[in-house]
Structures are given as C-alpha cells and as structure tokens.
Amino acid sequence: MNSFDCKIPNIRFGFGTHQDLAELEEDWGPRAFMAGDPDLEQAGVLGNLLALLKSAGIEAVKYTDITPNPDCFGVDKAAEAAREAGCTFVVGVGGGSAIDFGKAVAVVAANPGTSWQYTERSDHEILRPGKETLPIVAVPTTAGTGTEATPYSVLNNSKIKEKSTIVSDKVVPKLGIVDPELMLSMPPQLTAYTGIDALTHSIDAYVSALAQPFSKMLSLESIRLVAEWLPEAVANGSNRQAREKMAWASTLGGMAIGHAGTTLPHALGQPVSGILGAPHGGSIAACLVKVMEYSYTADLQRYADIAEALDPAVRDLPLKEKAEASAELVERLFRDTGTTVRYSDFGMSEKDID
C-alpha cells in the first residue's frame, strides 16, 4: 500500500447543531461576514443565525446579493464590504453557491488581487491564498456539494462565461455545522439535484487516479447512502432519517473529493454551467451515465464496487456484468428521482459544443 494523507475536517453534525453558533469559543474576532442564500432570509434562517451569533457576542454583516453559480465580480464587491466593515471571519450559509461565495470572500478580503486571479487557470499567473485568509464557518442547508469539507471554491466569470475554482487548504472551513434540520424545507427538485451532486462526487473520487484507501472508504459509504435514501428524501422531504442520511452522504462526498478530486463528469459539467448557467447537479446528471458507460471497462473492479454500493443485489454477478450494471443503476436512480436530463434541456445546442 502506497503512502497517503488523511485530512479530516472539523464537522459538527446532527439535528439542532446550528444552535452551536451561540457557543463559538474560537478566537476568530468580534465581527462576522455572513454570506447567505437570499431565499433563507425570507425563511427566517439567516435572522435566527444572526441572533445566535449576537448571543455569542459577535456582530455580523449580512450579505445576500448572491446568485446561483456565484459570480467572481460579486465576490470582489462583497470582499470590499467585508474589509470596510472590519470583518474577522466569514460564515457561509446555504447551498454550495453561498458557501463557495463566502470562501472566496474570505480570500479576497484579506489578500491582494481579485477572486478570479486565485482560480486555477492557465491564462494567468495564479495567486495563492495566504495565511491572512479569514477563517470560515460553513452552514450548509442543502445536501449535495459537501463544500463544508473541501478545499474548493467554484466561481463563474460572467464576462467570459467561464467557470473555475480556487483550490487551497486555506478555504477548508475551520468549522462545518451540518444540521439536517436546516434541510427539511428543500423542495423535491433541489433535493434531487443536490443529491445527484453528492453521488457524482463520490463516484468521481472512487475512480480517480488520485483515489486512495481513505477516500475510497468515504466514497463507497456515500454512494450507498445516496442510493438508499435519496428517493425517500425526494418523495418525503419531512422524513428526518432520510434528510440526516443525505446530509452525511454529502459531507462524505465532499471529504472524498477533497482527497481525490473530481473527474470527467465535473470537467464536462463545469463549462456548461459557465456558459448556460445550468444548475451544477443538472450539468453533471446530463453526462454521468454516458461517461460511466464509456469508462467502466478501464477498471472493472472499481465500477463493480460502485454497482454493489448502489444495489447489493448485484453482488453475485460476474465481475464484468457487475461493472457494466453500475451505469444502469445510476440511470435507474435518475428515473426514480426525476433527474434524467440532457444538455439541451438547459438550452445547449450543437454550436455550443466547442
């Protein structure tokens, strides 16, 4: 067995754990910048969290001008506001967009340059977040991105219609508060697409060339949980056990890609989101099955492992049949959760392919 690293993020998991914001003991300073999903303001979630921070003696600047697939120029504007307000740490609340937005604000508010200069691209000299990067607290309200456990912040550039990623251990949250209670109100379609995102993270990480024993263990458990509990979470969002299992699957998937990275489905889906604004989960769902149908012969054992995690009933099939079944089982999950989509459903045409 080759040597490998295990990085375990600081996660507080369980129903009611968002109340722990009232007991923050870490010395991150007296003022937070709260990057919150705008839909959560009307639902009262942000107000509740602000009150919890205040009870801990922490004032907060609330910022909700955040769009899905967050824009790098919006990040720069928000970072300026955070600097002017003297914010000492960032709290990201919402789905992957809001938390990734908050992560990028934490970088730009305390380091030189713009957020896009920190993204991993070949067309510019990449800036690296320094030790001054503000501490980050992540409070996810969806079960999909696992960003509370990753070193990634994914941003759009609306001027050139491209999407890229800040990659740094400096944007791994100092604390992730994963409270399934905050996910009970997710509508079915959002539940489905975010769940498929968690599934794809785990499949990507499992077949990645960077996969190692720790990441593989995380991936298989996440795949198993998504297969078992996502259909129920979509059909019955008030099922607390289903929400809990999906929240944990999402965090495990985030940890898995934090170690092994993502592969082709994300590489194909990311530019579609950049150009067309497609939802992240949908942009991946549109290609995942085809990628698996094409790829499974490259490593029959890994795809057989995925198939067995998706459905233990395939356990006794011959290796090649079991590996081939992995794509069919994912396609079945798509049908069961209403996430069968094509890129044309997001407005993509043949002229966009190049």
Image (cartoon, rainbow, N blue to C red):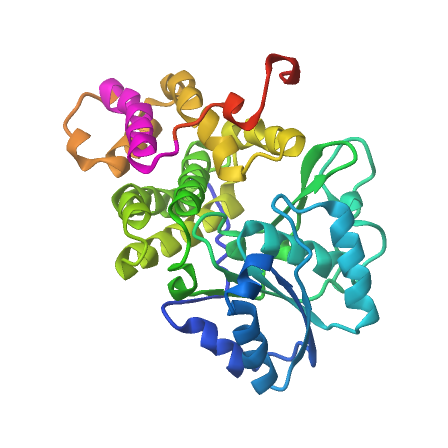
Q: Position of residue 268 (x, y in %)?
A: 56, 26
| 155 is within the stretch colored magenta | no
Q: Is residue 263 above or below residue 37?
A: above
Q: Is residue 337 above or below residue 340?
A: below
Count the marks.
Answer: 0
Q: Position of residue 179 (x, y in %)?
A: 42, 65
Q: Between 105 and 43, which is closer to the camera in this rendering?
A: 43
Q: In the rendered view, does 306 fall on the left or right side of 72?
A: left
Q: Position of residue 167 (x, y in %)?
A: 65, 46
Q: Between 217 and 117, which is closer to the camera in this rendering?
A: 117
Q: Point out the residue furthest to the top here.
A: 350
| 322 is within the stretch colored magenta | yes
Q: What residue is shown at x 42% (from left), y 16% (from top)?
A: 294
Q: Between 18 and 122, which is closer to the camera in this rendering?
A: 18
Q: Position of residue 50 (x, y in %)?
A: 59, 76
Q: Quadrant of residue 354?
A: top right
Q: Is residue 351 above or below residue 348?
A: above
Q: Point out the residue furthest to the front here.
A: 42
Q: In the rendered view, does 318 fall on the left or right side of 56?
A: left
Q: Quadrant of residue 38?
A: bottom right
Which residues, given as a range, are shown in magenta? 320-339
Q: What residue is shown at x 48% (from left), y 53% (from top)?
A: 6
Location of the N terminus (image quadrant)? top left
Residue 259 seen in the current view:
yes
Q: In the rendered view, does 264 fall on the left or right side of 109?
A: left
Q: Quadrant of residue 271?
A: top right
Residue 209 seen in the current view:
no
Q: What residue is shown at x 44% (from left), y 22% (from top)?
A: 291
Q: What residue is shown at x 33% (from left), y 27% (from top)?
A: 331
Main SS type for the magenta part? helix
